[in-house]
Image: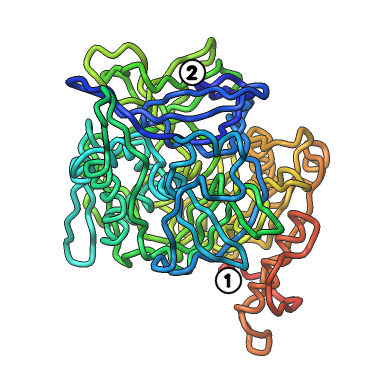
Amino acid sequence: MSRILFSKIPKGDRLLAIGNFFKKDEPTPRWRLGSLFDQGGELRQRWFDLEMSCILGVGREFVGEDNAPYLSHGFRKRLELPPVEEWQDRPLGECPRLARRLARNPEVAGQRCFVFEADGLTVWLPKFELARKLFFHAAFLVRAAFDPNGLDMAFSVYKEGDVTHIRTPSKVGAPSQLLKIKGYRDHFSWLLLDPDVRRSFESIWRSLNEEQTSAGSRYARWQFNFIPPSCLAGVTMEVQGPLDWDSRDLLVWEIKALQGLKFPSGDAIFFHHPSLRQPVRGEGGGWIRPAPGGGDIEVDAEEDPDEAKERQLLELPIEGIAFDGYPATRIAYKGQRANGHGKKVDDDTAPGGDTKTLGVADDATGGTIAPGEFQQLEKQEDQGQYPNRFVLLREIIREIAQEPGIELLELEVKPLPQVPRCSYHMMVDGTPRCYLLAGFKHPVAGVRCLVDIDLSDGKKNLSTQVIAFKNGTMEKQTIDLLLKALLKGSLRWPAEKLSKLLFDCNSIRHPCMNIEGRGDMDVRALAWRARIYSSLFGRKMCNLGPTVDARGANRYDMCR
C-alpha cells in the first residue's frame, strides 16, 4: 500500500493549534494559515496554503503509515447541538482547558470559539474546526470559500419539474472523480440547495473581506470567522479533545462525526460534468488509485500542478458526515437522458514505484507536478445503478457507525464477479447480483467486515457473514476469493476456505418475512441490528430499545 505523506509535516509531528490566516501585500497573494506543531516536545510554527485546511484537525498526529496518514487524540464525547441562537462567541484564550504554553501565544489565544452548554458540559468549539467539518472536504471547496461567489463559479443549479440538475465546469468546478462518489454528491447538494447552509459557507468570504487587517504591516491578517447554519440544532456531534471534569469544560480539538444533518430536497438530483460519459470497455474512466505495494505519495500544497495531467484522488480517513435520509443523487452521463441511474465507472491504477508528488493547489499552465484532490467523505464507488439494494442494511450500518469509538472504513455495493461456467452472478430477471461489503474499526475488536449477498429473487437462503482477517486489516483479494468460491459452490459460503483464509467468521440470520402473527417488522429489524452489532464487536449495542428473537422463513427482500 502507498503511504500518504505531507511535504511540510515531518512524520510523528502533532498539530497543537491553528493560528491566523495571512497574506503578503503583493499583486497576486495567496492566503496562508499559521499553525503550531509539537515536534518531539518542542513547538514548531508552520504555514500552509489554504488547501491544507482539509486535513488540519487539532490533536492529529501525522504518523504517515499505510491507510493512516494521521491519528486523532483526545477524550471522545457525543453531544446533541443546542439551537445556534444559544451559542456564544468567545476567544479561545478564555477556555480553561487550553494549555498554558498555547494560551501565552496571542495568535492562538485570539482565535474565535462557539461556546454552548450540552449534556451538562460547557463546550468550546473553535470556529475553524466547525467550518472544516462542515465544508472543507476538497481543496477546490476551500478555494471557493475564499473567493467572492465561489460556489457560483464551481456550480450552476436549475430545476426541471421534480428533478434538480447541478452542472460543474471542467476546469474550475468539482473534479469529475469526486462526482462518482455518492458522499460528495450528497455533500455538494446539501451545500447548494439548502439556503441556510449556503449562506453560512458564503459568510466565510464576507467575514474575510470585512475583518482582515494590516495595521501598517506588509501582511494582511485574519482570525477565522463565519456564521454557523441554524439547521445544526439537534444534530448529533461526536468530538475529541481535553475535558476538565471539575469545571465541566470540554475543548473540541476535532469533530469526528456530524449525524442527522437535514437534507433539503426530496427530488432526484443529477450531476453533470463534461467528462462524465458512459464508459467503454477498455477505456479508463474513474479515479486513479495507488497500486498495491506502490511508492509513497507526497502532498505538496505550494507547487503548482500541471493542468494537462489527470487528477488523482488522495484517499484519506473518512470524515463522518451523515444526513437524515438517503438522498437520490446520481450522475447524468454525457449523451444520456437524466432519468436513469447511471453506470458503474471503472477505476484505473497508478503504477507503483518511488515517491510520487501531487499538488492540491489550483491547476496552472506550466505547472510542474501532477494534480491531486482530497477524498475524505466516502471510499465506495458510485451506487446509483443499485439504489434499491440493501436499503435497510445500509441504514443499519450507518447507525452502527455512529456508536462511540466505531469507524466505518468502507461501505460499497458491487456486482458479484463473473466465474466461468457459473450463472449465479445474475439475478433471475437478468440483472447483476450484488454483494455488500462494510468494514468497521473498533478500538477493542479491531477491524471487522460484514459481507451480504443479494438474494431478493428467492434463489437461495444465505446468511450474512462477519469476518476478521488474520493480519488485522481488510484484504480485498481474500474477499474476491471468497466471492468466487461462493459462486462456484452455487451460492453457499465455502466453509473450508473461510476457515483457512480468515482469523474468524460467523453467520447472522436475516429477519423473517412479515407473516401475520410474526410481529412488527420494525421490531424485528431492531433485533437484526442487535445481532449484527453483537457479532461484529462481541457485545450489545447501546440504546436499541425492545427487541425480539425473530425466527421463521428467511426472506431477503425484507432486508433490502
Amino acid type, mark 2: Ser
Q: Contact (CB < 8 A) between labels 1 and 2?
A: no
Q: CA distance from mark 1 to mark 2?
A: 50 Å
Identify the residue at horizontal 60%, vertical 48% (top origin).
408
Comes first in the chain, label 1 or label 2: 2
Q: Quadrant of residue 328?
A: bottom left
Q: Is residue 322 left or right of residue 393?
A: left
**For this rendering, which residue is in front, 166 or 274?**
166
Color encoding of the figure: rainbow
Identify the residue at horizontal 58%, vertical 62% (top origin).
79
Amino acid type, mark 1: Met
**Circle 2: element type:** loop
**For this rendering, which residue is in front, 75 or 425?**
75
**Circle 1: element type:** helix
Q: Is residue 142 left or right of residue 408?
A: left
**Which part of the image, by quadrant, shows the N terminus?**
top right
Figure label count = 2
Q: Is residue 393 left or right of residue 222?
A: right
Q: Quadrant of residue 302?
A: top left
Identify the residue at horizontal 35%, vertical 28% (top origin).
32
Residue 181: horizontal and vertical position, in percent?
Answer: 41, 44
Identify the residue at horizontal 61%, vertical 56% (top origin).
249
**Which part of the image, by quadrant, shows the C terminus?**
bottom right
Within 10 Å of disc 1 (Cα), the crowding (few <14, some 14-19, many 20+) is some
Residue 370: horizontal and vertical position, in percent?
Answer: 36, 18
Residue 7: assigned label: 2
Q: Quadrant of residue 327?
A: bottom left
Residue 503: assigned label: none
Residue 325 shows in the view: no
